[in-house]
Amino acid sequence: MANSHIANPAPLGLAAFGVTTILLSSANAGLWGGVGAGAAIPAALFYGGLTQLLAGMWEFMRGSTFGATAFSSFGAFWLTVWYGLTHGMPGFGAGLGVFFMCFGLATFVLWICAIKIDIHHNLLFLALAITFAFLSYGNWDHGHSGAVKVGGWTGLVTAVIAIYIAAKSLINESWGSTVLP
């Protein structure tokens, strides 16, 4: 049972994931001349990375194994992306296909769990698994830009779902009733 003395960190973690995902996915999709990538790099460190990692630790304190695992894992994902892109790690670019594939597998496991939560979490993790599949293929070997672009669009869908769940949680809690289903 969740500890009710600790505020719900899920809306924060979902918002951090959603906004950071919009920034990077918009660049992958080819929107706005790719400028989303420039904003995604610092967001990956602070909002996507550190904020989600904190949300994950707070989910541990609330007793939510699923929330703790998901937020901590994706916080570490964004921190790894930030570090790899800003520190010129040898082989990081070439290894992105494998990196995305591994996170896709972890996301698939989270999707199996999310099916039991509700339709929105189910769709979120399904869309994210599909996004990782396209990004993995798109970054494999010498890259396949068309798959990266499709991964960008599916990433945008994923991000919108995450932001909706965050908004639903915040709004319903603030109003004390179901305003958003």
Image (cartoon, helix red, strand yellow):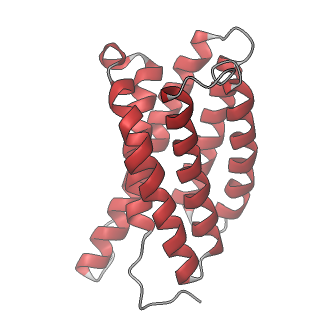
Q: Position of residue 168 (x, y in %)?
A: 35, 64
User: Where is 7 relative to 83, above or below?
Assistant: below
Q: Residue at x 75, y 39 (%)?
A: 102
Where is residue 63, by image quadrant?
bottom right
Number of marks: 0
User: Where is 103 relative to 3, above or below?
Assistant: above
Q: Position of residue 28 (x, y in %)?
A: 47, 21
Q: Is residue 65 left or right of residue 85?
A: right
User: Where is 146 relative to 67, above or below?
Assistant: above
Front-lying residue, 90 or 173: 90
Q: Residue at x 53, y 36 (%)?
A: 83
Rendered-image quadrant of the C terminus? bottom left
Q: Is residue 95 visible?
A: yes
Residue, far top = 142
Where is residue 88, by image quadrant?
top right
Q: Is residue 179 visible?
A: no
Residue, far left = 175
Q: Residue at x 60, y 50 (%)?
A: 125
Rendered-image quadrant of the N terminus? bottom right
Q: Is residue 161 left or right of residue 67?
A: left
Q: Position of residue 154 (x, y in %)?
A: 52, 32
Q: Is residue 106 left or right of residue 170?
A: right
Q: Position of residue 162 (x, y in %)?
A: 44, 52
